[in-house]
Structures are given as structure tokens and as C-alpha cells.
Image: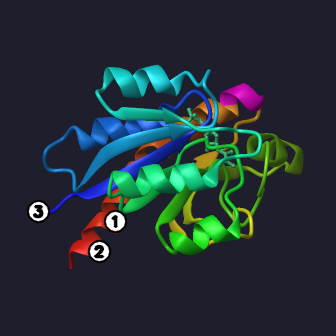
Amino acid sequence: MRKIKLGILISGRGSNMQALIEACQDHSFPAEAVCVITNNSEAAGLKVAEQAGISTFVVENKPLDANKIHEILIQYKVDLICLAGFMRILKVDFLSKWHNRVINIHPSLLPSFKGLDAQEQALKAGVKITGCTVHYVTPEIDAGAIIAQTAVPVLPNDDIQSLSERILAEEHKCYVEAVRLIAESNAK
Ligand code: GAR
């Protein structure tokens, strides 16, 4: 089995990155994590990636040096870019070089609650079900084709933290399954 090579982009905690790295440590998983790139030198996820033996890179943030990101991804022969809490916008010139090869996880059931603070948006809207979505990244924010979704209940006493934690636990599984789906469909 040829494993697809993942380049993971993070800005912070990196728990979704960690879920992907752990999945890749299973020999039967059809992907391998080859590099982690961040725009934030303080990102907690950097240490997690280093401890897992993955090559890590910090790129210039202001303005974001997307050309540098592109070069690293090419150098590591990345097949699929996974945005995992990467809080910068990738512009059309970058995305056109990686057409249908950039995916993102978002903490809502898209197309509801696009953009920032999706969990807070869900609470304010009073929905009883929200969740997470893995989707292809296009120039329009949180609007690309949906790959996988998981629904999560909103409970009566939820606050942003409790709801975010419940969604995050599902994000980790949903992201791994979305990568598996893509890798297996590439292999056909
Ligand atoms: C996750 O909840 C992810 O869905 C969200 O940021 C968090 C990152 O957590 N992403 C977005 O809101 C993107 N619009 P992590 O760093 O622990 O993976």
C-alpha cells in the first residue's frame, strides 16, 4: 500500500494534528505525516510534533509567507495538506497550486456557522445539534465540498467550553476518517 503524505498546518494547540499523527503511527493507516508547518512559533502543537519525530517549520506570519509553505510542502512531496486549527487564510494563488489537495476541519455542521467562533454561534442560535465538518478548502471561507461530518448534541447547560470539548472529541475521529476516505479513494 502506498501511503499518501500529509503536510499538517497548525496555529495553536494541535490536538487535531496529534490525532492525525497518532492515526499515521498505525501501520495499516493509508497516510503518513511528513511535516508540520506553523505560522506561530509559540504553537503548543510544535512540541507534540517534534516529540513524534515529525519535521516542523515556523514560517513568517506577517504577512504569511505562503510561498515558503509551498516550498516546504514540495520538498516533502506532500500529497494532501491538512489544516488543523490553522487560523490564517490561504489565498487563491496558493490554493490553485494545490487544487483539491487542501482540507480543513471546522467545528460546526457546515454550511451553518462559518468563520470564527462556530461553537459560540451555535449556542447563540439555539440549535440542538451541531458538530464538525471536514471539507476541501476553496478561496471562499468554509465553503468547499464536504468530505465528512459528525453531529454532536447541544445540551441544555452547555457553555462554549463544554460544547467545544464535546465537538473536539468528535473532530479527532472525523478528521482521521476523512483522511482515510481520501487516501483509499486515491488508491483506486
Ligand atoms: C478546532 O476546534 C478546529 O475545528 C478549529 O480550531 C480548533 C483547533 O484545535 N478550527 C477552526 O475554527 C477553523 N475555522 P486544535 O489546534 O486542538 O486542533
Alpha carbon distance from label 2 to label 3: 13 Å
Measure the alpha-carbon separation of dots 2 and 1. Answer: 6 Å
- Residue at 44% x, 49% y is 72
> What's the magenta region?
157-162
Q: Does the numbered disc 3 mark a residue whose Cβ is under 8 Å from ligand 1?
A: no
- Could you tell me which quadrant the N terminus lies in? bottom left
Q: Are the residues at dot 2 and dot 1 in contact (C-beta closer than 8 Å)?
A: yes
| Residue labelled 2 has its Cβ within 8 Å of some atom of ligand 1 | no
Q: Is residue 148 left or right of residue 87?
A: left
At label 2, counting other C-alpha atoms closer than 10 Å, the crowd grade (few under 14, some 14-19, many 20 or more) is few
Looking at this view, is 151 or 120 the one in front? Answer: 120
Residue labelled with disc 2: 185
Dot 1: element: helix
Residue at the far bottom: name it: 188
Dot 3 and dot 1 residues touching (CB under 8 Å) = no
Question: What residue appears at the point 72 percent right and 54 percent down from the top-left corner?
Answer: 89
Instruction: Please name the amino acid that badge 3 sits on.
Output: Met
| Residue at 43 percent of width and 33 percent of height | 56
Can residue 174 be seen here? no
Front label number (3 vs 1): 3
Q: Position of residue 12 (x, y in %)?
A: 61, 30
Which mark, by number, is residue 1? Answer: 3
**Sequence-earlier tag: 2 or 3:** 3
**Looking at the image, is 163 positioned above or below residue 29?**
above
Task: Tell me which numbered mark, 3 or 1, is placed earlier along the sequence.
Answer: 3
Residue position marked by numbered label 1 in the rendering? 181
